[in-house]
Amino acid sequence: KQEVTQIPAALSVPEGENLVLNCSFTDSAIYNLQWFRQDPGKGLTSLLLIQSSQREQTSGRLNASLDKSSGRSTLYIAASQPGDSATYLCAVHTTGHSNYQLIWGAGTKLIIKP
Amino acid sequence: KAGVTQTPRYLIKTRGQQVTLSCSPISGHRSVSWYQQTPGQGLQFLFEYFSETQRNKGNFPGRFSGRQFSNSRSEMNVSTLELGDSALYLCASTPGQPISYNEQFFGPGTRLTVL
């Protein structure tokens, strides 16, 4: 059974710092992994999708990497800003005909202090 | 291109009632998935529809049901509401094929409160 873990659960850093959020999963048989952000009380915004054959994806100040063999992904945020404050979630898309679904981590709550 | 829309945005119901939530996917997307989000359980998968057929289902009781129409719009229904059904219900749309490409785009959610 696929399980997804995100560490740390919460993180508070001063503005301008570079930071790394971690996501680990127990079963390497995945189609892809997706990172989202969620603002309080709101829906989910897709940040990056990494397909299983890829090693990383970049969008602006965000870079996500994927190491399937070790069951790990990291989200790197460069030059953090107060607007980056949100909860960041990772989800893996599992393979298998009967398990076509996203399995979610519990999220990392990020606070960027001005 | 318009994003995923969900209606209504907020609902207040009492125990025992039933509720219907609606989701309109991104134009051209044929797959709609539904998720429940609560502070205690996090995000949990309810079910996924593709071309009007339920393709996968999570571990929720039969009180939770859904359907998809020919225009890909989807509805989910919860009957005999319980206090524990209070949650943010999110729907996500994807093209649906190929199955290995599944970038999901989410709507703003429907906040359901059961009193």
Image (cartoon, rainbow, N blue to C red):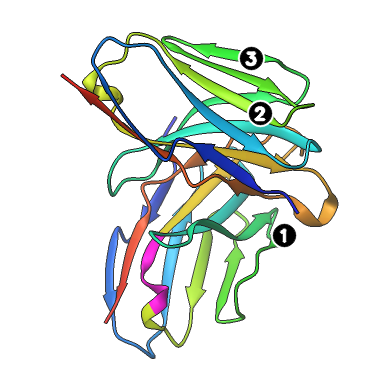
Residue B115 included in the magenta stretch of the image: no
User: Could you tell me which chain the residue with mark 3 belongs to?
Assistant: A
**Which residue position holds label 1?**
B56
On the same chain: label 3 and label 2?
yes
Residue type pointed to by label 2: Arg
Which contiguous range is marked in magenta? B84-88
Q: Nearer the viewer, residue A12 or B24?
A: A12
Cα distance in 3D space between marks 3 and 2: 12 Å
Mark 1 crowdedness (10 Å alpha carbons): few <14, some 14-19, many ≥20: some
Q: Is residue B67 left or right of residue A30?
A: left
User: Could you tell me which chain the residue with mark 2 belongs to?
Assistant: A
Residue B26, image x, y percentages: 51, 39
Determine the residue positioned at 55% across, 44% down.
B93
Disc assigned to residue A56? 3
Asked whether residue B69 appears in the rendered view, the answer is yes
Picture layout, residue A111 above or below residue A20: below
Q: Is residue A105 left or right of residue A101?
A: left
Residue type pointed to by label 1: Asn
Residue A80, image x, y percentages: 31, 15
Q: Nearer the viewer, residue B8 or A54?
A: A54
